Amino acid sequence: MIDLDHNATTRPLPQAVEAAREAMTASYANPSSVHRGGQDARRAVELARVSMAALIGAAPKALTFCSCGTESIDLAIRSALATAPGGRSVIVTTAVEHAAVRELVDHVAKREGAEVRLAPLDAEGIVDVGRLAPLLDARVRLVSVQWCNNETGAIQPIDQVSALAKARSGAACLVHTDAVQRVGKLPIDLRDPALGAIDLLSLSAHKFHGPKGVGALWVRPGIPLWARLLGTQELGRRAGTENVPGIAGAGAAGEATAQWLADEPARTHLGALRDRFEAAVLDGATRAGVRALVNGPRDSARRLWNTTNIGFEGLQAEAILLMLSERGVWASAGAACSSGSLDPSPVLLAMGVPEPVAHGSVRFSIGRFTTGQELDEAARIVVECVARLR
Ligand code: PLP
C-alpha cells in the first residue's frame, strides 16, 4: 500500500498510540476529579496543551480543545457572530474553503441573516489581495480564510489578508484562519508581528499523525469566546469531559511534529520528491495521450510541499481512484469526505477549472514518511491506470 492521501488523514505515530493507550488504562480518571487519578489525567491534558500550543507559537492557555477541526471552525465562526457589535453582520470568506467553513457560512447566511462576501481569487485559487479592499468596510465582523487548501495545497497570504482586514474594517473585525492543513506541515509562530492581525485559528490533530476526534481553537487573549456547549470544562469555553486519550495522543504527536518541523531540509527533500512525482505523472500521461495538468499553484513556494492535484482531462476521477486502489495506491478526488460523489469538486470549479478537467482531477498528498521509491512506483502505476482508462 502506498498512502498518497495524507491531506485526508495521517497514520498515528507510535508515541501517540502509546500516550492514548496509557490514558485509557493507567490515567483513565476524570481530569476534573480532585484525587490523584484525576490529577494524572489533568496532567496529561495540560502537557498536551503545552505541546499543541508550541506547534503554533501560542500560549497554552489560549488553546481550547474540542472534538475536531470542524468543531473548532464552528466555534470560531459562531462565536464571532454571537459576540458581534450591532451593525456588524458581514462575513468575508472564499469559495475555496473546506466544507466545514463553506457549509456553515452558507447556513448562517440562509438561516441567520448574515451577509457573505466572497474574496476574489486568482487563477490558482489564491486570494487576490489587490482586489480585496472594496469588500472590507465597517460592517464586516469576520474574515475567515483558510491558510492552506486541502485540495490543491495553495497557501493563502493570510498575513496580508488579516492586516488588510484590520486596516479597512477596524479592530471589531475578527480574522479567523482554518489552519487545519497547515499545522504540522509548515511552522507557524503566532508571536510573529506579521501574524498579529489573526484572532482565531483552527487545527486538527489527525492531520499531523495524532488521533482523530481532537481539534483545538486558538483565540487571541482578549477576544471573547462565546461557548456553544455550556458547562465547566475548558474554562467554560467548551464543556464536556475531555477526550483524555485523544488529547494525550495529540500532545505526543504534536511534540514529535514540532521536532520534525525544525528540520527544514527534510521538507525541502520531500517537496523535491513531490515535484519529481508530479513531473513523471504529467509526462507519462501526456505520452499516453491523456491531457494532464496541475490544478492550483505551479510554483512550489505558493503550495504546500506535500500536495499535487492533477486533472486528467476527459477521465473520471472515481474510476482512476478505484483502479489505483486495486493496485495499492491511495489518493482522493476533492475532499475525502465528498468522495463517492460524482460531482466535481466545488473548490476546483470555483477556481475556474473546466468541468472535463475537474471531473478527472485527483489529489495526491504525500507525508513525512513517504519515500522516493514509493513515489516512483506510484507514478508508474498512475500512468498505467490513466492510459488504460483512456
Ligand atoms: N479544514 C480543512 C482545510 C480540512 O482539510 C479538514 C479536514 O479534512 C477540516 C477543516 C476538518 O477537520 P476535521 O476532520 O478534524 O473535522
Image (cartoon, helix red, strand yellow):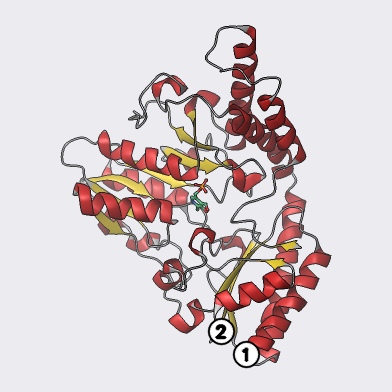
Q: Secondary structure at mark 1?
A: loop
Q: Is residue 355 visible?
A: yes
Q: Nearer the viewer, residue 339 or 168?
A: 339
Q: Residue at x 21, y 45 (%)?
A: 89
- Graded by Cα atoms within 10 Å as few (under 14), some (14 to 19) or many (20 or more), the crowding at tag 2 reads many
When asked about the image quadrant of residue 15, the answer is: top right
Q: Nearer the viewer, residue 18 or 208?
A: 18
Q: Which mark is residue 315?
A: 2
Residue type marked 1: Arg
| Rendered view: 357 above or below 193 | below
Residue at the extreme left: 87
Q: Is residue 114 visible?
A: no
- Graded by Cα atoms within 10 Å as few (under 14), some (14 to 19) or many (20 or more), the crowding at tag 1 reads some
Tell me the quarter of the image containing the N terminus: bottom right
Q: Which mark is residue 390?
A: 1
Image coordinates for residue 75, horizontal then vertical, percent: 38, 38
Q: Residue at x 28, y 52 (%)?
A: 107
Image coordinates for residue 359, horizontal then vertical, percent: 49, 78
| Rendered view: 39 above or below 219 | above
Residue type marked 2: Leu
When asked about the image quadrant of residue 174, the answer is: top left
Q: Is residue 329 left or right of residue 107?
A: right
Identify the mark nearer the N-term, 1 or 2. 2
Q: Is residue 69 left or right of residue 299?
A: left
Q: How many marks?
A: 2
Q: Secondary structure at mark 2?
A: loop
Q: Which mark is residue 373?
A: none
Q: CA distance from mark 1 to mark 2?
A: 7 Å
Q: Are marks 1 and 2 in contact (CB under 8 Å)?
A: yes
Residue at the extreme right: 373
